[in-house]
Image (cartoon, grey):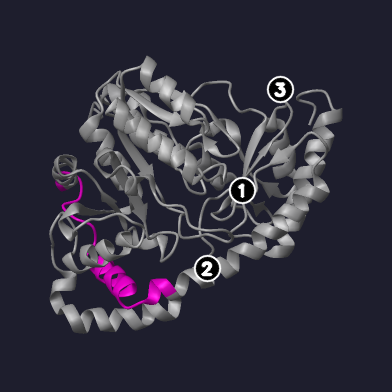
Amino acid sequence: MAEPRIDVAARTANMNVSAIREILKVVSRPGIISLAGGIPSPDSFPMEIIGELVPRVLEQYGSNALQYDLTEGFLPLREALSDLVAGLGIMATPDDILVASGSQGVLDAIGKVLLDPGDLVAVEAPTYLGAIQAFSPYQPDYVEIATDNEGVIPESLDEVLAANHVKLVYLVPTFQNPTGRTVPLGRRLQIAEIIERHGVLLVEDDPYGALRFRGDRVPPIASLAPRHVVYVSTLSKVFAPGLRIGYTVAPSRLRDWLVIAKQGVDLHTSTFNQALAAGYIAGGFLADQVPRIVDIYRPKQELMMRALAEDLPDGFTWSRPDGGMFVWVEGPDGFDMGPVYERSVAAGAAFVPGKYFFTSPNTGIETMRLNFTTAEPGELSRAVAIIGSAIEAELVAPAGNL
């Protein structure tokens, strides 16, 4: 019997296996300390709260919690999210909100609805790899916006929009993945003015904003230019990622199209998980849990800062975020973190080479992303020491001589 012929669509040429997911497979073996993953610590999961919410949800909603529901999302959750984003200065009714299976589901739907082959998407350099993976199957081209230690440089954004017909701008302005940087208020006001003046749509991805260790909260750009911003967020970092609860506040015409796109994918996000999330927010559990998560992450980040100062050689710099989950390390121009990664893994520690976060090829080879949320304190110190030793060895060894 002949095998069935499977001719994949041309768009699959733009679909690549996640480099980070492949790295995580490599480093998941015993004995490897991973600073590569961008995942929350299991210690941050509110296990007792979930145990309390499950019977409460079943008692309150009965079989409705297990039934098909609206594509837009479980109404009690959208009501709770409306109150939540109001605290950020984003005015949205429950009807303005769409719940998705993680924020990744929102990004994919945005790409499906908005992007034609050849359309331009403006992104930070570097940017979140998952967004590139979500958009790329729809065959856009990318144009990079310059950044510095305070994130996106508004003048560069203005130049990019003036010189190109950009379909949408994608930014992670708060505790960015991968750099951890936060765009300050003054720049956010400039960005809001720029996107309004150019009449362009901005996708503001905000998965880490609640994880602030120091300093004052900065308002989302969506609160400054609501008609021009699609605000995307998730409960994965402050509740439980396995529940896959993301959401968006989008201009009404776009939101309607996102609903249609979602109907063709999964009809709706898990009703039961949404009911849990509604109880988590409306019951005040989220407000209580976030400080606990911060208390887990803050000392780990501070420990990593000290370890980097002790173990990295001169000529290497790193970001000093006020929150989030990541630290970004930069070496001298031309230094290649690829061989450092190989040496580090061989010695028992892993990170993500920064080149994967750039849309331009052969860019960012001297950079790396470090995550501090999942490793134990002793492991953090040891992993940074291993990476520092690998850098020292690569500085004195011929390239490729591992």
Q: Residue at x 77, y 23 (%)?
A: 399
The disc, 3 or 2, on the residue closer to the chain's N-terminal end is: 2
Q: Is residue 390 above or below residue 274?
A: above
Front one among 306 and 31: 306
Q: Please state which of residues 148 and 99 is positioned toward the viewer in this rendering.
A: 148
- Look at label 1 and name its amino acid: Val
Q: Secondary structure at mark 1?
A: helix
Give the residue number, with chain letter if any, for mark 3.
Answer: 334
x and y percentages locating residue 308 in the rendered image: 75, 48
Q: Earlier in the sequence, mark 3 or mark 1?
A: 1
* Rendered residue at 55%/53% (across/down): 325
SS of the residue at dot 3? loop
Which is the main secondary structure of the residues drawn in magenta? helix
Q: Dividing the picture into quarters, in which one does residue 381 lie?
A: bottom right
Residue 275 image offset from top left, x and y in percent: 24, 70
- The magenta segment is 263-287
**Residues at marks 3 and 1, CA–CA distance in whole angstroms:** 26 Å
Tell me whether circle 3 and circle 1 mark residues in contact (CB < 8 Å): no
- Which of the two marks, 1 or 2, is nearer to us in this view? 2
Residue 147 image point, x, y percent: 54, 31
Which residue is identified by label 2? Answer: 293
Q: Are marks 1 and 2 in contact (CB under 8 Å)?
A: no
What amino acid type should be assigned to the residue bearing mark 3? Gly
Q: Residues within 10 Å of mark 1 (few under 14, many from 20)?
A: many
Circle 1 sits on which residue? 27
Q: Quadrant of residue 134?
A: top left
Give above or below for 137 relative to 55: above
